[in-house]
Image (cartoon, helix red, strand yellow):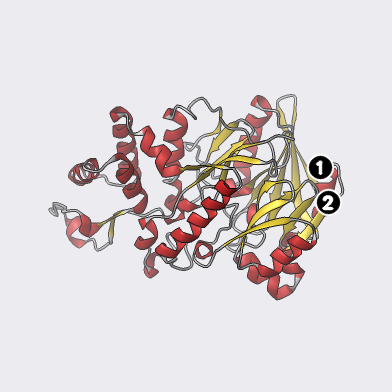
Amino acid sequence: MINVYSEIGRLKKVLLHRPGAELNNLIPSLLEDLLFDDIPWLEMAQKEHDAFAAKFRELGIEVYYLEQLMAEVIKDPVVKKEFLNKFLDESELYSSSKKKTVTDYLNKMTDIEMVRKTMAGIRTNEIKLNRVRLVDLIDTYPYVCDPMPNLYFTRDPFACIGDGVSINHMKTVTRNRETIYGHFIFKYHPEFKKTPQLYGRDNSLPIEGGDILVLTDKILAIGVSQRTRPEAVEKIAKKLFKDTTYETILAFHIPNKRAFMHLDTVLTQVDYDKFTVHGGIEGPTDVYELTSDHGRTKIKQINDTLENILSHYLKKDITLIKCGGGDYIDSRREQWSDGANTLAIAPGEVIVYDRNSVTNKKLKEYGIKTHVIPSSELSRGRGGPRCMSMPLVRERG
């Protein structure tokens, strides 16, 4: 079912999550904890996301929804029970009476309602808790189970690589619960359960999908970033070298900043020989080559420009298209709204946010066909079209 051997092969199947009530559970005092800078307006965010999904369908790309796949998985009552136990444990519901109350509440719902509610979060005033313990009487926290507002960025909780999947351990507790859905889909869903697993969520070393770029069937780029640890890169590299066609991992050390976050916020491939790039990682770049030497991982530091490094490994002259046209102000403003986070749906053909007008103009000047989607609310979550999509199948070549 999974077949992703490049960043630009014609896209055939993609996974999305339509933003839900989890965005209405964001409040200003908890934005930092939930990794948001602003509160998107849900109704408009859904309209924008529906336009995103419609663009895929218009182009003949099959759209899967995370919530629908998960609802299909929990049709099996045994799996549903396993899922609820896992969800409640990771929501830190350690009181048996609280766990039972929440379980009874969720079990009254249809399968799809239950999935959406676990994603949306449960407010304290939604259920009647038996407040007999001191902690319950003192606690003023507004949620029994936290919302997962970052879920519409389906790129991060797991990553499709070749014909396998990395089910990631996310850097923060807030996002790590999102990987529960990938765990169950790839364990039980009839279309996905035979997918080879390259990394598991039980690993303690964080790695996130936005840091993984599938350059070819032999070369992978992984960002060492705010969200991905170098030890995790070494760990997944050993598995890839042992069980897949991958021979080289390029580890890009990018600044540990919220503005950069993942590798795909500063670098994405748009054609065989073209990449969008944010000026913050141009010039001399910290890149490390990982290869296998008789079962041992060999690491070599590469001292060169980004353009030369990509040209060397992809064996062609590479053009870097600068986010914001390279202008100091435009590049930083449009990188903040993910001008460099393009999603290639075929070589030389991408989906982009409408608000990044300077970058979009530059893409067209370089012969890149752009499909523009509305983005006033979606962009408030700090992710672009690539962040919001997980390719499942691409054509090879």
Q: What percent of the width, then of the height, locates residue 96? A: 20, 42
Residue 48 lies left or right of residue 274; in this view the side is left
Determine if residue 365 is in view: yes
Q: What percent of the width, then of the height, locates residue 134? A: 17, 56
Tag of residue 314: 1
Picture mark count = 2
Amino acid type at image mark 1: Leu
Residue 354 lies left or right of residue 300; in this view the side is left
Quadrant containing the C terminus is top right
Q: Residue at x 46, y 54 (%)?
A: 150
Which one is nearer the viewer's eye here, 300 or 192? 192
Q: Neighbour class for label 2 at 10 Å: few (<14), some, many (≥20)?
A: some
Whether 235 is drawn above or below 118: the answer is above
Check disc 2 and report the residue beneath it.
318
Q: Residue at x 20, y 47 (%)?
A: 98
Q: Residue at x 45, y 27 (%)?
A: 190
Q: CA distance from mark 1 to mark 2?
A: 8 Å
Disc 2 is placed on an element classified as loop
Q: What percent of the width, then of the height, locates residue 388? A: 54, 52
Q: What percent of the width, then of the height, locates residue 269? A: 72, 50
Q: Neighbour class for label 1 at 10 Å: few (<14), some, many (≥20)?
A: some
Residue positioned most to the bottom: 329
Amino acid type at image mark 2: Ile
Residue 154 lies left or right of residue 135; in this view the side is right
Residue 170 lies left or right of residue 341; in this view the side is left
Indicate the quadrant where residue 258 lies.
bottom right
Which one is nearer the viewer's eye here, 355 or 331? 355
Quadrant containing the N terminus is top right
Determine if residue 342 is in view: no
Tag 1 near tag 2, CB within 8 Å: yes
